[in-house]
Image (cartoon, grey):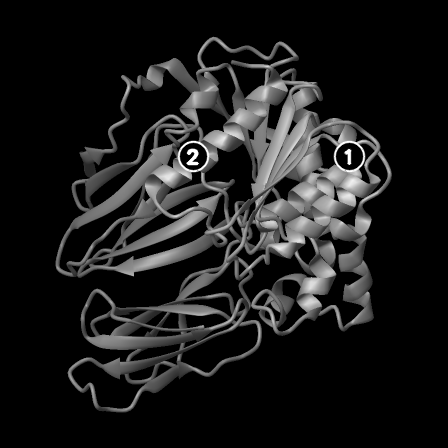
Amino acid sequence: MLGVEKPRSDAYLILGLSSKITTEAYYLDANDPTGEFRVIRSRQTGIEYAVEHHTDTFYILTNENALNFKLVKAPVNDPSHWETVIEHSENVFLEGVSAFADHLVIYDRESGLPNIRVRKLSTQEEHKISFPEPTYEVSESINPEFNTHTLRFGYTSLVTPGSVFDYDLDARTRELKKETPVLGGYDRANYKSERLEAIAPDGEKIPLSIVYKAGIEPNGSNPLLMVGYGSYGFSYPDSFSTTRLALLDRGVVLAIAHIRGGSELGRRWYEDGKFLHKQNTFSDFIACAETLIKAGWTDSEHLAISGGSAGGLLMGAVLNQRPELFKAAIAQVPFVDVVTTILDTSLPLSATEWEEWGNPNDPEFYFYMKSYSPYDNVEAKNYPALLITAGLNDPRVSYWEPAKWTAKLRAMKTDHNVLLLKTNMGAGHGGASGRYERLKEIAFEYAFLLDQWKLA
């Protein structure tokens, strides 16, 4: 992958080349656009880094000898000479850094939750911005000015709509500038969110976020929808959804399983859910389901699950391994024919994916991938009710993957539960284009779930 960006200082152009595990960056004086790009650090397999500029210094976030990344700095005139600014931590995952005239803003993740730390460069004093809820998501907003002491960031949670704050980096005060309006008289006091933990078979503690309408209790039979992803280091955000209210207001509990393969608990969390450790992703998700049942939030007759793309692979794998655990499932554009697809180098989801899943030309990876590939592990047994979606123009998961999986399930499953395949003839990997067409797709999925739960 190739991209060009300009740091906030406007002094340089940064040209970045990257794969999933390796980075190489070049820089060019913005006042000399016809000049030559110079390399910051030549590529080395497995070493990633990201560059930020401040006066005569580059701040560089890197995983060199630092699984959870560390922050180094280097003089612009000798960018290959790195000096550590923030040491590597086993418990804190460094995700990004932004440079302002007298401040560094550091984004990290600890105990599964995102943080913003502020370091004043003139004094080296540091503080962390606090957030009030047990589960939430924060992100840097647009901050084009270099000479400023105001940081604009976004905040949301499972009960708080997307909000934009201005934060005074010196006074340590914040001002709400905008909160996304929710039509229909939404009152966040009517909803509650919590953070739970599940224990995986190998003893790892898996974070679980749940949200529900106030007054709902763990009575053992609540309708519950659990979602997950667990691939590519993607941390599933605990963010607000207006469409989700249609479920919450009907008494449905929503749970997010922060399983391995994501980066919620750092880079190790990601590494432990890829390659020859991919089974951890599926075992974690199953452990989350069992935890919710044991805690009384639901039971197997009311537990539904949903995931898309690599999350669709997750759906297929757990349905093969523990079909009796779930009432219903939605698999959106699911990546389910793993070995065949990745062996076909004419497809986009192929050779570039070897850094995530492994190269199936290697027998060890081939047989491991085949051991969990949803299509290859369909058996003659009962499966839950299942809605499978596809896009005819999907370049990532070709429409025939969910189609052939559906066909094999129909041929082999021994139950009479509904099995639907819905192919959007004008959509790609992201579903239908346009706000209202997307809402129709969500409404269709919700109707499927409500029918299974026997809710109006």
> Foreground residue, 407 or 158?
407
Identity of the residue drawn at 46% across and 52% down? 426
> Foreground residue, 405 or 70?
405
| Mark earlier in primary sequence (1, 2) | 1
Numbered label attached to residue 322: 1
Q: Residues within 10 Å of mark 1 (few under 14, many from 20)?
A: some
Numbered label attached to residue 32: none
Amino acid carrying label 1: it is Arg
Q: Quadrant of the N terminus?
A: bottom left
User: Which is closer to the viewer, label 1 or label 2?
Assistant: 2
Image spot of residue 148 (x, y percent)? 13, 54
Q: Residues within 10 Å of mark 2 (few under 14, many from 20)?
A: few
Contact check, label 1 and label 2, Cβ < 8 Å: no
Tell me the quarter of the picture where residue 315 sits. Answer: top right
Identity of the residue drawn at 83% across and 41% down? 412
Q: CA distance from mark 1 to mark 2?
A: 31 Å
Compared across the picture, whether 219 is left or right of 411 comes to left
> Foreground residue, 349 or 25?
349
Tell me the quarter of the picture where residue 174 sits. Answer: top left
Q: Secondary structure at mark 2?
A: helix
The reply to whether residue 137 is visible in this rendering is: no
Image spot of residue 385 (x, y percent)? 69, 30
Amino acid carrying label 2: it is Lys
Q: Residue furthest front?
A: 425
Give the labeled residue for mark 2: 440
